Amino acid sequence: MLKPLALYIGLKYTRAKRRNHFISFISLASMMGIALGVAVLITVLSVMNGFDQQIRLKFFAMAPHVTIMTDQSLTESWRALGESAKRVPGVMDYSPYIQGKGMLTHEGQVAGVSVTGIIPSQETRVSELGEKMTAGSLGTLQPGQFNMLIGQDMANGMDLRVGDKITLLTPQMSSTPLGIMPRYKRFTVTGIFHVGNGFGYDDSVVFINFQDADRLFQGANPISGLHLKIANLYQARPITLSLQRMLSEHYVVTNWALQYGAFFKALSMEKTMMFVILLLIIAVAAFNLVSSLVMVVNDKQRDIAILRTLGVTRGFIVWVFIIQGAVVGVIGTLLGIGGGIILALNATAWVNAIQRFFHVQLISSSVYFLDYLPSHLEVSDVIQISLIALGLSLLATLYPAWQASRTQPAEVLRYE
């Protein structure tokens, strides 16, 4: 019977009276502070999730999950090696590649590139290169035709279009009547792809046919091997260890975590630090809640003393003020959840509208990998933030409630 009465009194104390408007204002400020902190935290984490999701989608559309490398020729043996790799649990498919360095020249313009020889039919099994084509197609890389796919940034920088001729020079030397000359070959641009700025593909990687690359880099011991696609990205390490144990010492096995793991760890650390920093907004609001409850306790000294003389326990008094603080925390958290969800679900559309209205580009792909503000709301983030906000609100009530329970009726009512 005490707890419903404690609830009634606690709710009554949250309502403003003529003589304690300032206390009510502090409580309202605490409530709005909690709401603002929760809403901002949900929105920022959703944006961080959006960036992380889009970067992963774009990155792993091209980057291999696991790579087997060797300096030996795999022209005849790549299929047998791939079938052996598929026997490892978790490996879904494979595609052979040959990789070397070269230099492109076109009408006086020069660019250093990484040349990758692929088999189009196999490459579609491990990457989304075919879906990234903005002009031409992946299928044009036929053996013996010496066709080439280049990135959008390189095409813009060197003023290249589909059908243009371009010269590729390699570090290997050839003997000619004029002396030792770099080996070179004329290629036809038959496709342009666009992955996204910041990933290194659009401005420094070109693709040619696997057999053409084998002929071009013949005698130069280029890096060759297999790109593997696995079912679970986070199983890359155990799969790598299994492959390394299975293959001979002539092969080196690496994976995306070893090659690019530091980048994704930095993204995760950035999200964690942002969470901790913005959590301070809720902490400040909780501190304000402590202040408002302490003032309420001082304002209600006479009421507390009368209740104690009527026989209520100290635990009852504690519950009264815990309930009052909890009401502020719950309402503030609910308002923050509603506002945060609305902001997170509409952040992309609203930022795009602002950019169109003011004719500005707030998000540049040259800096942020994307040219728009992504947002991905995760229920786990909302639950975590809500529990933390409620926990801090309840924690803020403990000292004022304890202080109220220590009120001595005789001292307070001495002069009444």
Image (cartoon, helix red, strand yellow):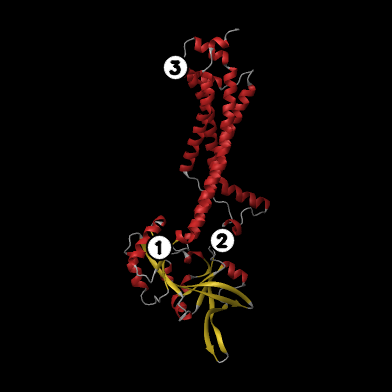
Residue depicted at 49% across the width and 40% down the height: 382
Q: Position of residue 313 (x, y in %)?
A: 46, 15
Q: Which residue is mark 1?
A: 229
Q: CA distance from mark 2 to mark 3?
A: 63 Å
Residue lying at the far bottom in this picture: please name it. Answer: 177
Residue 200, compared with residue 101, is above or below; it is above
Q: Position of residue 184 (x, y in %)?
A: 54, 82
Callout 2 secondary element: loop
- Density class for disc 3 (Cα within 10 Å; few <14, some 14-19, many ≥20) is few
The reply to whether callout 3 and callout 1 are in contact (CB within 8 Å) is: no
Q: Which mark is residue 2?
A: 3
Question: What amino acid type is highlighted by mark number 1?
Answer: Lys
> Sequence-wise, which precedes: disc 3 or disc 1?
3
Q: How many marks?
A: 3
- Quadrant assignment for the C terminus: top right
Callout 1 secondary element: strand
